[in-house]
Amino acid sequence: MTYQTFRMVNGRRQVTGSADMNVINYSYGDSGMPRWGYQIEVSAYRGWGDALKASISGKATKDGACKVHKSSFPSRKLAPLSSWKLGESFFDTTATRSGAIGRCATTWTLSVTNAAYGTSKSSLKLNEFRCDNATAGRPTVGCVVPWYASPLIYSKSRAPQLASHITRAQRSGLPGATFKSPLTRTTKAATISRNRDLACPRGESRPQGKSCDEYPLATSKEGLSAGGQRRTFPGCSIPRVPSRTGAKGASACMISISDQNYQGGMNSSFYKAERMLDGDPYRVLIGD
């Protein structure tokens, strides 16, 4: 941000000072809390003349399902150069009743005041947080950044057959491993059931001790109900289904029941911890 002072002399603009500033604004919160913070930091790193006689202050405001808990950015001189001025604000969601979901946009309005020139204002806005009391299995209020594709991480050492299947499925072109091609949560029972039935037909035989695993996950909108063809891999114990490549479709593989049970527990914990609602993106990764 640049702040400039000037006077009009004989109809011509005469610059009397200038200050170039770095402005950093950021929000932070927690999925288990109904309150989040929105901070702003300002530092003039270069300047001269009357501009450096100015002071800067700020006020935080809101728009949406929230209320201001606290806003503090007292007036401070721009000078000396390379000194940081901090504004801090906190907001509480009003989406607190059971089933409620709410978004909130927060704004810092900065005021640069100079006795000889008056006050100039500039605003910075963030609209990142969604808060809810609608996450299944989590009867509390919390807030998340919903566009961020959080990682659902399966352990290769804990569930080797699951990890092998997902790795091969993603390498064959199916989405879910990156921010550019995440999976999308679905909570619709009909879609989940359809994905499972298409990828792992109920009448298909299972080897003893094995269960049919599908990828993309049945709880994603990218499952087989979204189109494409069924695929599998050597060693998956699914005859007469070929290996394929491409971003559409779903892979099926017979894996151990213990791996399948582990996956179910991980999925439930992940969806609750990340407050994943219908339509939220997420990634599927394999860890140690």
Image: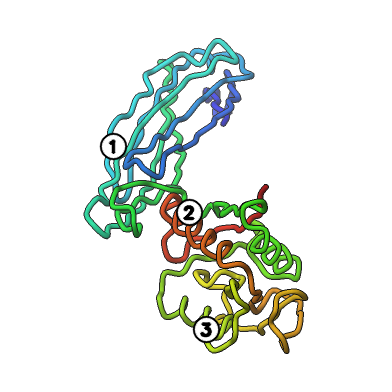
Horizontal side of 249 relative to 226 (left or right) equals right
Dot 2 amino acid type: Phe
Residue 85 lies, with reference to residue 253, above or below; the image says above
What's the residue type where badge 3 is placed? Asp
| Mark 3 vs 1, N-terminal side | 1
The spot of residue 223 in percent (x, y) is: 57, 75
Classify 10 Å Cα crowding around label 2: few (below 14), some (14-19), many (20 and above). Answer: some
In the structure shown, which secondary structural element does the residue marked by tag 3 occupy?
helix
Query: Circle 3 sits on which residue?
Result: 197
- Looking at the image, which residue is at 49% across and 36% down? 26
* Disc 1 element: strand
Comes first in the chain, label 2 or label 1 = 1
Judged from the image, the secondary structure of the residue bearing numbered disc 2 is helix
Q: Amino acid at mark 1?
A: Val
Q: Quadrant of the rendered structure where residue 109 is?
A: top left
**Residue 68 % position (x, y):** 28, 37
Mark carried by residue 68: 1
**In front: 73, or 97?**
97
- Please name the residue that numbered disc 2 is placed on: 270
In the displayed orientation, state which residue is furthest to the top.
80
